[in-house]
């Protein structure tokens, strides 16, 4: 067992799936993972909220808030800059 490669067993099945294999190209890993996802899982990815890091690893409250608690610049955002 000591000779077996270490990997993050993301699906906890004890087998290294292609998407878990860091030696494979990213494109191969992504294709494998996406092929395993349901339509609902793929659609759900469209609605994930982006979390921003806050002080000492906390999550910053509200959209557009920097870790310091000050508003983030709106460059690159679809929000109107005031």
Image (cartoon, rainbow, N blue to C red):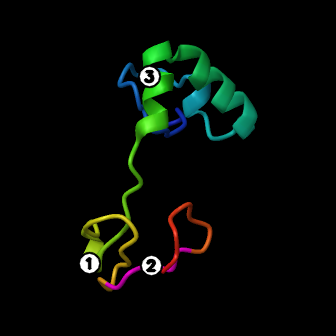
- Nearest the camera: 68 or 1? 68
Measured Cα–Cα span from mark 2 to mark 1 = 18 Å
Q: Secondary structure at mark 3?
A: helix
The residues bearing labels 1 and 3 have C-alpha atoms spaced at a distance of 31 Å
Callout 2 environment at 10 Å: few (<14), some (14 to 19), or many (20+)?
few
Magenta residue check for 72: yes
Task: Measure the alpha-carbon separation of dots 3 and 2.
Answer: 30 Å
Image position of 72 with respect to 5: above or below: below
4 to 38, vertically: above or below:
below
The image's mark for residue 41 is 3
What residue would you read off at disc 1? 56
Residue drawn 24% across the image and 69% down it: 58
Residue 21 shown in magenta: no
User: Which of the 4 image quadrants contains residue 77?
Assistant: bottom right
Classify 33 as above or below 53.
Answer: above
Position in image of residue 54 (x %, y %)? 30, 74
The segment highlighted magenta reads: 70-74
**Nearest to N terminus: mark 1 or mark 3:** 3
> Against 42, is 38 above or below?
above
Q: Position of residue 8 (x, y in %)?
A: 45, 38
**77 left or right of 12 in image:** right
- Give the mark nearest the N terminus, 2 or 1: 1
Q: Nearer the viewer, residue 33 or 4?
A: 33
Can you tell which mark lies on residue 72?
A: 2
Q: Can residue 45 be seen by looking at this rendering?
A: yes
Write down the quadrant of residue 68 in the picture.
bottom left
- Helix, strand or loop under label 1: helix
Q: Main secondary structure of the magenta part?
A: loop
């Amino acid at each position: 067992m000591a000779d077996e490669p270490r990997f993050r067993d993301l699906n906890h099945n004890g087998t290294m799936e292609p998407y878990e294999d860091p030696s494979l190209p990213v494109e191969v890993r992504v294709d494998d993972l996406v092929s395993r996802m349901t339509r609902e899982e793929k659609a759900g990815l469209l609605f994930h909220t982006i979390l921003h890091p806050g002080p000492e690893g906390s999550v910053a409250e509200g959209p557009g808030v920097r870790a310091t608690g000050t508003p983030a610049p709106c460059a690159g955002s679809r929000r109107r800059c005031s």
